[in-house]
Image (tube, rainbow, N blue to C red):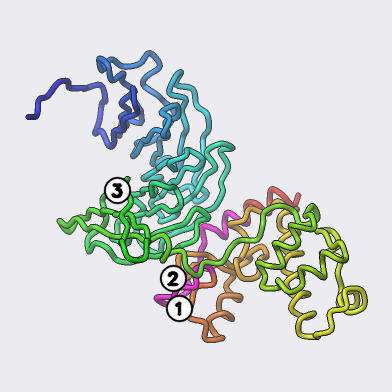
Amino acid sequence: MVKLIHTLADHDDDVNCCAFSLSLLATCSLDKTIRLYCLSDFTELPHSPLKFHTYAVHCCCFSPSGHILASCSTDGTTVLWDTQNGEILAVMEQPSGSPVRVCRFSPDSSCLVSGAADGTVVLWNAQSYKLYRCGSVKDGSLVACAFSPNGNLFVTGSSCGDLTVWDDKMRCLHSEKAHDLGITCCDFSSQPVSDGEQGLQFFRLASCGQDCQIKIWMVSFTHILAGIPEDQPEQFAEDWSEDDVSDWLCAQGLKDLVDIFKMNNIDGRELLNLTKESLADDLKIESLGLRSKVLRKIEELRKKVKILSSGIPDEFICPITRELMKDPVIASDGYSYEKEAMENWISKKKRTSPMTNLVLPSVVLTPNRTLKMAIDRWLETHQK
């Protein structure tokens, strides 16, 4: 049985999206406004409509608690609102300035994803309201997004029909043509499924397209994350304890050196000051090859420390060189790299992504002009 219980007609133009919290209904429209209604009697809240956007509002969504509402617009912004009083908590500008088509909170409210018409996708820290990571898809506008129930992954869908899976560090884990005429919506099932034999956990994902089809996908977190390299710790290495150094050695495949480093009380500061002479004379590491490997790893760590201390946004750093990009290009894995570094990577017959270890669908590199402009603006601001 279906029964109409109420009709709301307060917007002056097409209504693009609606969202429920436990106590509220939110709607957004081409008329540039967001409206909030109480679910008990569908009366509009005193602080509604919410006005800030200068162009059409495409999407709105509540945080899981319902205390925050996000809205995104053609004006290139994603706005966070306090639902209790209608006050603006933050205005987050898409780095490219492109119209923002979709936004979604992570299940724990710690992050927010915004996807834009130029294919850029941004992962925001929803507590500090600062940009955490950004990426992009090769073709089309981003029009759909959904987080996995555990928040470890999210998917985006484009107007060209591409479905892309990202992890919570904005690494592209999988991308494929899902629908011929563009994706309109996607969502995860809240309940996991086990295969029964190996105990692997899957989540069902549904995607809807303009090709009149709905496709159901099985996403295995265990499989999709296999082979993804771990990031270096974000903590400054100078502050590492001896145990932190031991953990770092293990992560670099140097577990056999843990006891030697502990015997010599090597903490983070000592680690960064090690030289080939101290490795041979003080730590008594006899193997030349092993000393060379340790020095290479330490040099990589020094670069990481330099980047952290400089305050350079991580999305401006080439994943290969770990240096500020001068000529960024987008590879077929959806990540941006320094052009020369990626060309060298490919020329050495490495057909896998430096970020995901998956085979690159193509070796074509596309100039990332949006990122180049963002880097140039950052340099103008910080090098005065």
Q: Is residue 265 above or below residue 85?
A: below
The reply to whether the magenta stretch includes residue 83 is: no
Write the residue at 80% across / 85% down: 287
Q: Position of residue 30 (x, y in %)?
A: 30, 34
Quarter of the view holding residue 130: top right
Contact between marks 3 and 1 (CB within 8 A): the answer is no
Write the residue at 43% across / 23% down: 83
Residue 195 placement, left or right of 170: left
> Secondary structure under badge 2?
loop
Distance in Å between CA atoms under marks 3 and 1: 35 Å
Amino acid carrying label 1: it is Val
Instruction: Say which residue label 3 marks.
Output: 189
> What's drawn in magenta, residue-wise?
355-375
Residue 291 placement, left or right of 26: right
Judging depth in this view, the residue of 58 and 213 nearest the camera is 213
Amino acid carrying label 2: it is Ser
The reply to whether the magenta stretch includes residue 362 is: yes
Of the numbered discs 3 and 1, the one sitting upstream in the chain is 3
Instruction: Say which residue label 2 marks.
Output: 332
Quarter of the view holding residue 256: bottom right
Q: Which mark is residue 92?
A: none
Judging depth in this view, the residue of 287 and 121 nearest the camera is 287
